[in-house]
Amino acid sequence: MDTGPVPLRRLLLLTQFPLWALTILSFVFLLGALDARVQATNDATQARVRIENLSDLLVHVLDMETGVRGYVIAGDPVFLEPYQSARAALPGDLLALRDTMRLSGTPEQNARNVDRIETLIFRWLAEIATPEINLRDTDPDAAAELVRSQRGKKLLDATRAQIAALNARETQALQAREAEAVRQLERLRLALLLAGSVLVLLGLVNALAQAGLITRYLGNLTRAAQRLTDAAPTPTPAHAPGLSPGSSLSPGSGLAPAPTLNRTGGVDGGGPADDTPGAATLERRRAPVTVQVGGPREFRELAGTFNLMSQRLQAAQQEARDRADQLAQRNTWMRSLGELSDAMQAARSLDEGARILERALPLLLPGTRGALSHHNASRNLLVPLLHWGDEAAVTHAPDHCWALRRGEVQHPDNRRFAPPCPGQSGAYTCLPLFSHGETLGLLRVANADPDQPLPDTTRALLPGVARQIALALASLRLQDRLLQQSIRDPLTGLFNRRHLEDVMNEQVALAHAEGRPLSLIALDVDHFKRLNDTFGHDAGDAALVRISAALKDAAPPGSTPARPGGEEFSLLLPGTDESGAAAIAENLRAQVAALDLRHAGIALGQITLSLGVATLNADAATPAALTVAADQALYAAKRQGRNRVELA
């Protein structure tokens, strides 16, 4: 025999039995009261019908009497119309009255009463009404005598008396039945009120009993659930659970801490990752919240399920905290990558961008070493742009790199059959940098420990970093290209007039502020128009290109060689006094005069220069004044016979 715990379903059914029994009894009682009420209502309705039938019969008898009396008095057949219609309706009235009387409480007595009424009516018709109508046409005096005998009146009075008596009895019965119907209605209301009250009271008692039964066993479960809820960690809105705002990331995670790159390429805050665990990893692992297994079978199963759920929930919470830590680290890394993008967008040159990347890449890719190379102007070499860690910068040809050959990322494990790149050793991951279909360079990354490969987390971050670097390099190269187009002369490659004026304004201000010398050489090709007219404009352009090359060779570092326009050239010399500028001008003049210029196999003859030298002083203290002074010296050289240097 099963002696285990009683199922909860059986306990709940037992508590429902009294309620169900009382409900059935109440239903039976209410059904009886409702039937009595319906029967009383039906009896009252039948009594009303019988009274209406008696009234109809009485009206027709009166119509016949009135019609006969009017015909006898006036002799006009019109008076017989009510008589004829009432006599025609008389059989139907009597039949309806008999049918309704059978449903009364005393059908036999009522049937005898109807028979007496019928006998009296037909006696009046046979003995009074018909003879009076017939005698009115043949013997009016006899008809009048029959009326004066009052036999018809007596018969009709008796008929009316019978109908009135029967109507009185039916009216009395109707009143009694209506009173009974009212009493039955009151009983029904009382029964409904009593049954409803008892059912509500019993339902309340039953509900309290069931609630007590359930809450007694569920109390421990509820308190355990509350403890489980209170034990759940609450994330702060500023950061994910388990990661404080200033906590560092573990080196093995492959995610960087939160450096802040300013728009000038500097790094605010941040630093190398350390081994300090986050708050989530230091949190004391609590024991699972459990409840005691007991009570009915269902509660035992519920308690066991709750204990299992508590264990799984604790494991899920721990997993959620770990994932929150990872997500916070990922968000921090993405924020740092966004700051790198902002800083690179603010960079003005490729060198400045390289300085930003040199500081950012060790933070974005902690525990790594590597180098970033880009194509030189001839695109025949990969020139190191920056490196970090213990990586050495190496210049090599692009076709030596398998990543550039195949146009895809090359990890050590997917180039097992390819020989190492020349001059490279170790487990490197190489990422080609592309932008708008153009190969920009190569990013090479390896683990800081030469004996260890890159972690998978770090390898997952590399494509995002490479994309940002490629976009930044493309932007900087395009920016530099556009800048050079805006400040360079397209024929000679020298600076144009606008750039010369900008630099001159800047250098004049620095010369005044620092007290250093500043000189300007203005030069012009002698008889250049004659050269163009004799050999053509192509030959003139070729001569200008050779002269500009000589000017570039003669220009010292930090100077600004420019072509303001036509055959005119300028050389701005910061930090050079008048004597130094004159020496440079004389050297340039001699070099140009010694050139053997040819174009299309035709000798162009000797080309000479006239040069004017001016130095910043009290008389030429502004850019415009310095330019005018140099031009005046140039014109003086022209007047002195050309192919010479004159000082302002």
Image (cartoon, grey):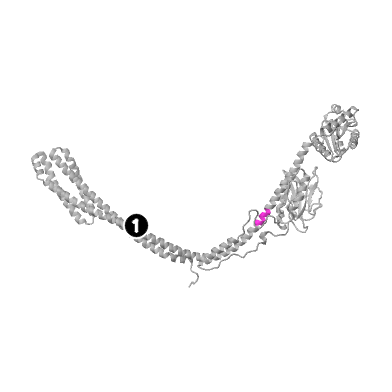
Camera sees residue 175 = yes
Camera sees residue 493 = no
Could you say which quadrant of the image residue 458 lies in?
bottom right
Q: Can you say whether 504 is above or below 473 in the image? A: above
Q: Can you say whether 38 is above or below 490 in the image? A: below
Q: Nearer the viewer, residue 118 or 583?
A: 583
Q: Which amino acid does the dot numbered 1 rest on?
A: Arg
Q: Where the C terminus falls, by quadrant?
A: top right
Q: Which residue is mark 1?
A: 189
Where residue 63 appears, x then y in whole percent?
Answer: 18, 43
In reply to whether residue 395 is colored magenta, the answer given is: no
Where residue 150 appears, x then y in whole percent?
Answer: 11, 46
In reply to whether residue 325 is colored magenta, the answer given is: yes
Where residue 358 appears, x then y in whole percent?
Answer: 77, 50
Whether residue 405 sits left or right of residue 286 in the image: it is right
Q: Main secondary structure of the magenta part?
A: helix
Residues rendered magenta in the picture: 323-330
* Residue name at image x 26 percent, y 52 percent: 46
Where residue 338 appears, x then y in whole percent?
Answer: 70, 48
Q: Can you say whether 29 is above or below 553 in the image? A: below
